[in-house]
Image (tube, rainbow, N blue to C red):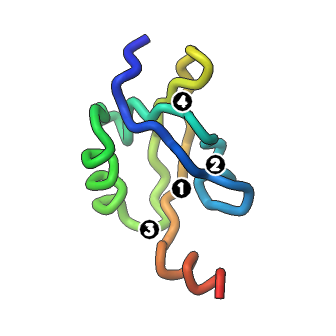
Amino acid sequence: PNLNGAVITRVEPGYPAYEYGLRNYDVILEWNHQPITVHSILYRYVEMTPPNESVSVVIARDGELQELQVRVGNRNEYLRSLE
């Protein structure tokens, strides 16, 4: 498979991304059916996605492609929950 994409370098239990199945070293290849070739594109798509919207995310993990459904959280609410 094509492994161009954005590598997840830190996701831990309790993080919203972890709850939806993303793990360290997964490579995000598509966000909501849009190809991801570099981190900056992924950041832009995530920022443009409204909170609480579910999107399709295609990842490569251990050489296998997987499609996950991920609900975008509200960053400010998440940060407040950590206080």
Residue 20, numbered label: 2
* Residue lying farthest to the right in this orientation: 13
Residue 47: percent from the left, percent from the top? 32, 62
Looking at the image, residue 79 lies above or below residue 40: below
Q: Are marks 4 and 2 in contact (CB under 8 Å)?
A: no
* Residue type at numbered disc 2: Tyr
- Which is nearer the N-term, disc 3 or disc 1? 3
* Residue type at numbered disc 1: Arg
Q: Where does the N terminus fall, quadrant-wise?
A: top left
Residue ID at (28%, 32%)? 37
- Which is nearer the N-term, disc 2 or disc 1? 2
Residue 51, numbered label: 3
Residue 71, numbered label: 1
* Residue type at numbered disc 4: Glu
* Residue type at numbered disc 3: Pro
C-alpha separation, residue under disc 4 versus residue under disc 2: 11 Å
> Which residue is labeled 4 in the image?
67
Q: Check disc 1 and report its element: helix, strand or loop.
A: strand
Residue 40 vs residue 8: left or right? left
Asked where in the image residue 67 lies, by quadrant, the reply is top right
Residue 50: percent from the left, percent from the top? 37, 65
